[in-house]
Image (cartoon, helix red, strand yellow):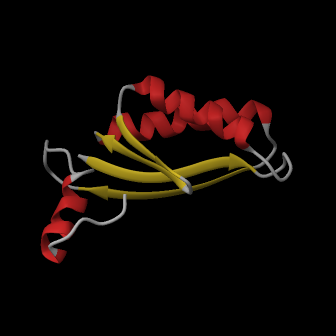
Amino acid sequence: MVLAEFSMFPTDKGESVSAYVSQVINEIDKSGLNYKLTPMGTVLEGSWDEVMGLITRCFKILEPQANRIYSTIKIDYRKTDKSRMSSKIEKIESILNKEIKK
C-alpha cells in the first residue's frame, strides 16, 4: 500500500492557479482512491500502480495548458493491505493520549 502526498500546479499562469488545481482535484475525486485534500497538497492511498497512474493522469490534464508545471511527490510504501491514512494519525494520538488537529 502506498501513501503519497503530492501537489501539482502550473507556474506560468499568474498568482492564482486554483482553476488548474481544481481540475487536478476533480480527477483525484473521480479516481475512487482514498484521498485527503490539505491546503498544501493531497494525500493519496492505493497500490503503487493506482497512485502513480493517477498522478500521471493529473499531469496529463495540466500538460496541454501550461508550459511549466511544478510538482512535489512524497511516497511511503509498506507491504500491507490495510489503510494507513487514518491509522498513522491514530497511533500518534494514542502515544500522546489526546486528539490532535486534523
The answer to whether one can see residue 62 in this image is yes
Residue extending furthest toward the front? 98
Q: Position of residue 48 (x, y in %)?
A: 32, 42
**Residue 70 position in % (x across, y down):** 67, 54
Identify which residue, 26 or 94, lies in the foreground.
94
Residue at the outermost top position = 30
- Give the quarter of the image for residue 35: top left
The mark total stands at 0
Quarter of the figure that contains the C terminus: bottom left
In the rendered view, would you say 53 is above or below 101?
above
In the displayed structure image, the side of residue 90 where residue 14 appears, left or right? right
32 relative position to 94: left or right:
right
Query: Measuring 24% from the left and 65% from the top, which residue is drawn there?
Result: 99
Q: Does residue 95 lie above or below 44 as drawn?
A: below
Can residue 60 be spotted in the picture?
A: no
Across and down, in percent, residue 43 comes to 41, 49
Q: Residue furthest bottom?
A: 96
Where's residue 7, x and y in %? Answer: 56, 51
Taking the spot 13% from the left edge, 68% from the top edge, the residue there is 94
Q: For this view, does 70 lie left or right of residue 100?
A: right
Residue displayed at 81% across by 43% down = 67
| Vertical comparison of 45 with 93: above or below | above
